[in-house]
Image (cartoon, rainbow, N blue to C red):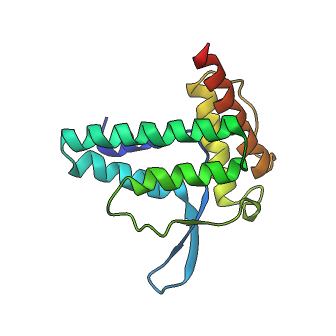
Amino acid sequence: MDIYERAGCIVAAVACPPLPMLGFNFEGEDVVFSSHDLLRTTFLNILTCADMETRQAHLGKTQLVEAEMFDALERGEESVYSVFCSYVRGLLQIHEAVNPDIRFKDADYVCVGDKIHRCACSHLRGHDHMYNFSAACYDKVSYGDILNIYASRIVQKSVCDSD
C-alpha cells in the first residue's frame, strides 16, 4: 500500500463526516473545501516527514482528541456539529504547520447533493462497510441527519465499549 492509500485509509476511519471548511485561494478569496482534504494532507505529512517517535506522539494526541469528542457527544451539552468542528480542529491543531485559524461554515451551508454532502454520503457508506452497519442510500438525506447518524453511532459504540 502506498503512502497516499494509507492516508486515505486513515481519513476513511475518521469518526465524523467531512465538514465545510473555510479557507482562501491564491487571490485571497474565500473558498469552501472538505475538512477531510486538509486532514488527508496533514496525515500525509506525518507519514512522509516524521520519525517513528513523532508518529507515536501524534497517534497518542489523536486518541485524546477522539476521546474528548466521544465524551462531548455522550454529554450532549452542545450541538453535534459543534462537537465535530472541535474534533476536526483538534486533529488539525496537532500539526504544527497548520494555521491555528481553523474556521468552518455553518452546518446549514451544506445542501443535499453539493460537494460536501456527496463526500459525507460516500464517507458514511464507507463506515457502513468498515463497521458492519446496514448499508443505506444517503443521497437524499439532509446533512443535519447525516451528522446525527454519525453521532448516534459514536454514542452507541461508546456504550457498547463500556459494557
Answer above or below: position of 152 versus 120: above
Name the residue: 48% across, 78% down.
25
Answer above or below: position of 112 versus 64: below
Depth check: give the residue in front, 42 or 163. 163
Depth check: give the residue in front, 81 or 18. 81
From the top left corner, tell me how far across and down residue 73 is, in percent: 66, 39
Q: Total of numbered circles in the picture?
A: 0
**Residue situated furthest bottom in the rendering:** 27
Quadrant including the N terminus: top left
Quadrant including the C terminus: top right
Residue 98 lies left or right of residue 144; in this view the side is left
From the top left corner, tell me how far across and down residue 68 is, in percent: 54, 40
- Residue 18 shows in this picture: no
Name the residue: 70% across, 60% down.
114
Residue 17 lies left or right of residue 47; in this view the side is right
From the top left corner, tell me how far across and down residue 57 is, in percent: 29, 41
From the top left corner, tell me how far across and down residue 121 is, in percent: 67, 44
Name the residue: 72% across, 59% down.
107
Name the residue: 60% across, 36% down.
71
